[in-house]
Image (spheres, grey):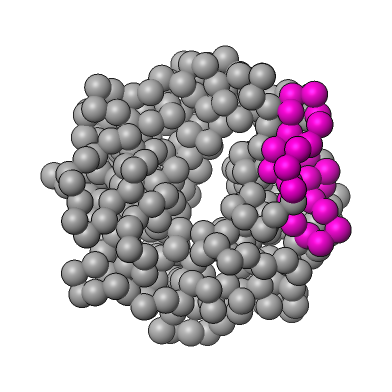
Amino acid sequence: MQFPRPNFAHLLSLSGPFGTYEHADHSLARVEHGYCTDDVARVLMVAARESNPDREVADLARSSVRFLDAAQDANGQFRNRRLSSGTWFGPATSDDCWGRAMWALGTTIARAGDSDLRLDALRLFNRGATARSNWPRSMAFATFGAAEVLRVDSSNQGALRLIASSAEVLDRPERSRRWQWPEERLTYANAALAEALMAAGSCLGSDRLVESGLRQLKWLLEMESTDGHLSVTPAVGRGPQSDGRKFDQQPIEVAAMSDACARAFDLTGDGEWRTGQDLAVQWFLGKNDVGALMYDPQTGGGYDGLTASGPNLNQGAESTIALLTTLQGARRFAKAV
């Protein structure tokens, strides 16, 4: 399958003096909306996944680590909101911003070529690994970071303890044979929950957790596929008694499916999962419920959502990074052929 190369031009255009701006009006940064740790962590992750980054992408990774350093408190939690002036507001938490920061830091430790950057990331990760969250998705995101650390340092005690704690939060019974999911409704980044079970099970040597994650992902992929393309859970969510609403679909859901299928393929070698990752790429390329291209080929920016009338043409950081991570996954698969 042909697919475009990851293009960082638009993501770089969202850069400000402290980090990457969260929102965009079409392709222009909404400076007045400031920054958030959630998105800067995503920026660091996608930059760290580049094995041979150019100078601008390498600088992006460094500025993102500086941002996370400023966001983290002494207890390892992170503040999420920062004004364009650089002023922080709101408390430090172990909500999604903590989980995503831990994911990005772990990815940097395992994959970045800059040794100084890896050391800075390790310092922040080890401090963050003492925190915990009651939110399953936060723990799922942190699990991915811990698994990355353990891939290069199997003795890291903070990562090991974090994975064990995550398994306790994420190992939940499925609701029914018809609704093979641990929550009453599908909400956002759903595939991350199944993937985290696989990641935790692999690190802990638990075949049961791996199998649970694979089973839930298979069910989710079937739930979010129709007529040979992805039709992912809309922003309003989806429950057993779905009202049939398909929109607005968010790129984060597609990117989560892409990552989860890639991990499932790595663990099993089953071509079904490669097909799932292909469907994620194709969603951005126009194989979706509307037949609309979900990115701007000129800027490299991902569109913010799929509506019944076509794409939301704003190109925010989250949607652009969802596109980039999905294309990175496709590139990795292509190299493995």
Magenta-colored span: 67-91
**Residue depicted at 40% across the width and 46% down the height:** 253
On the picture, is 184 further left or further right than 152?
Answer: left
Task: Identify the residue at the far front of this view.
Answer: 90
Observer-nearest residue: 201 or 308? 308
Whole-percent x, y for residue 210 in the image: 42, 76
**Residue depicted at 66% across the width and 37% down the height:** 36
Task: Identify the residue at the far left of this view.
Answer: 227
**Residue depicted at 41% across the width and 20% down the height:** 313
Whole-percent x, y for residue 297 in the image: 43, 20
In the image, residue 330 above or below residue 159: above
Task: Tell me if I can see residue 144 in this picture.
Answer: no
Answer whether residue 121 is magenta in the image. no
Task: Tell me if I can see residue 10 in this picture.
Answer: yes
In the image, residue 206 above or below residue 274: below
On the picture, is 214 further left or further right than 133?
Answer: left
Whole-percent x, y for residue 193 in the image: 44, 63
Whole-percent x, y for residue 130 in the image: 76, 69
